[in-house]
Image (cartoon, helix red, strand yellow):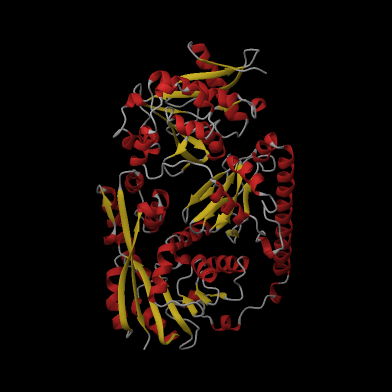
Amino acid sequence: MPIRVVEAQEQADKDAILEFVREVAAGDVEPGAEEEVGGRTAGHGDLDSWAHHFMALDTGGMIAGAIRVNGLHEGSLGPELAERVGLGELLTAFTPAQLSHSSSPVVAPHKRGHTVASRLVAAVVQRLLRQGVLVDLCTCAMDLVPMYYQLGYRPYLPPFRSPGLGVRQPLALCPRDLEHLREVESPAAALLPPELDDDGATAMALRRIFAEFRDPGFDRVSSRALWARLARSSLAAGLPGVGLLEGFDAAELEAIAPHVVRQYFMPGQFVYRRGEREPGMGVVLSGSLGVVLAEVGSHVLAVLGPSEPFGELQALGPGERSADVVALERSEVLLLPPNFVDRVGREDPELGFRLARRLLQVLGQRLVAANGELLAMGRSSAHPARSRRPGIHAATPDVSEQGPPESFSVAALGASDEEILSMGLRATAIGAIELPALLGAGLVDGQAVLDMGAGPGLFASALGRRLPGCTLIGLEADERARAMAQGIAARQGLADRCRFLGADPAATPLPDDSVDFCYLRLVLQHRRDPAAVLAEARRVTRPGGIVCVLDADDDSVMIHPPAAAWALLRERLDEVKAAEGGDRRMGRKLLRLLQDAGLQQVHASLLPVTRAALGAEAFVDIGFGHLPRALQRGGLWDDKAQGAFDELRRHLEQPGTFASYAGFLVHGLAP
């Protein structure tokens, strides 16, 4: 049915568009039906009052779709959205009249898969050219990114998470970059008169401002390497499975490439959040993702590696995300839109059919693996007496009888399973920086390694994957965290090399000289008796083995421009730690502590962690995410602290803010 696009002139037309958007947003989960605008959804946002609204009408005059564009010389985006799109940086090179912001197109469900969205965007492009706009910005749902790439938009900032909606990708369109528009075969190329071509000058200006600005898509070399990483067996439950794209030839894979999005996620960054109404799924290319469900005692339900699918398709899912999916390390994923198979099938029905059949095979394989896990869980819970524990557990002292709890004790913190996982994620997230330093300190594959503060075992399991010849022992007094650690190790096939003991670091059940490398990571800052813990570490480490300590020091935090909120929060944190017997300035004291413990050839170094390296979201969560719970434990969390924490988070997430902190790594030889 023919579609025509017109700009709304009368208030009645604008009201009809807003009502249409509300109906689509309320009755469907199509990405683009909602968008973040100062915490509001489309149709109620602050931008509506000064936007130019376009509507797509069918032959009956019914609205089939709508889109909105705001010229930035006509009003204000608001501080939150302005920060999301990097407006401050853009204004260093462009005037407000040269910039605009567009919403995602909202399309009626029965019109999706037709030309409505493309016609709406084309109308926006025509307006941009008439008004002399050089850059149009949008924050796009991930499943719409391939369409926007084909229209000529390019990424220029890292993706961010919009609360309740999911991951959003900032994109920029240079409507006068004729060469790029032709290269991606954008319909906008036909709208640009040759005399308005800027020969790529606007794109060059964006490259100078934003390191992330790039041309999207896959060239032939990179796409073949990418698909080769996917053409392998699934790792689910060790079954001889089928890779999602195994058996597809080069031409077929290149036909698939324009319909998917390749994206990186940093450790601790959530790919999907439970309850979000954003359909689509993905496939892990590298790294590992954890599937998390708070109601289950063993919080990390599965660890997914390369070639494993994750997420839920709109046609098969419950309408909302059923679990959190979080990056356990720096991970590269391929995001598939909810109508991925349909998009491919419209261009090549046979290829679409093969993709659908392969997807069902992979999902069926996952179902078989899940059933196997359920049967195993049922057998173990029905006959707990048959579950044999290592003999060394018999010598484990009862943690409850070891005197007053230290500030590191998970039980003392009253932590939930979700908080335990969060602690583990923060501890694991700097692994890419930490592991090379440990290798430099003397960690060698094949050694017996003791992790004296294992938590939920994420770091120990990461070491097990990277050093296949090592045996690992993790100490963790809290039963819930220890159960998580054991479950993660088992699911990653590390149960034969990785075990976890319920013991206090100052009184382990291990014999003398039993390990080659003893590691205390973020442990001593929580202890009343760091010297006793180091004495125990020296006892269990063989002569010539290595005792290595990583810890923090709050005075290493650097923030510019300075943040007054951090000074208030740090003062309160010092008070809480002092009452608990901890020390948030342990880092500077490690050199003397290891020397006093009798270790030899003690060496100290710093591991800098920057906002630029981790990304703003992960940096804030890893470095400062512990503050609310810590102050709540100490009774020092009030409205003033909440306000300071919110202010600190906003400050650290500002694009122009520099922030860093350092880990203190000190190691020595056991005599």
Looking at the image, residue 158 lies above or below residue 21 = below
- Image coordinates for residue 242, horizontal then vertical, percent: 71, 56
In the figure, residue 290 lies in which quadrant? bottom right
In the rendered picture of this protein, how many numbered marks are placed on residues? 0
Picture quadrant of residue 622: bottom left
Which residue is at 52% across, 31% downward? 151
The residue located at (71%, 51%) in the rendering is 363
Q: Position of residue 414 (x, y in %)?
A: 47, 61
In the image, residue 607 lies at what x, y percent? 34, 65
- Left or right placement of residue 487 versus residue 419 in this view: right
Q: Is residue 195 above or below residue 450?
A: above
Q: Quadrant of residue 130?
A: top left
Residue depicted at 65% across the width and 58% down the height: 232
Residue 512 on image: x %, y %: 46, 89
The one nearer the camera, 170 or 589, is: 170
Whether residue 559 appears in this view of the structure is yes
Q: Is residue 292 above or below residue 650?
A: below
> Would residue 86 be found to the left or right of residue 473 on screen?
left
What is the quadrant of the N terminus in the image?
top right
Q: Compared to 637, does 427 lie above or below?
A: below
Q: Is residue 403 visible?
A: no
Report the front residue among 183 and 6: 183
Name the quadrant of the C terminus.
bottom left
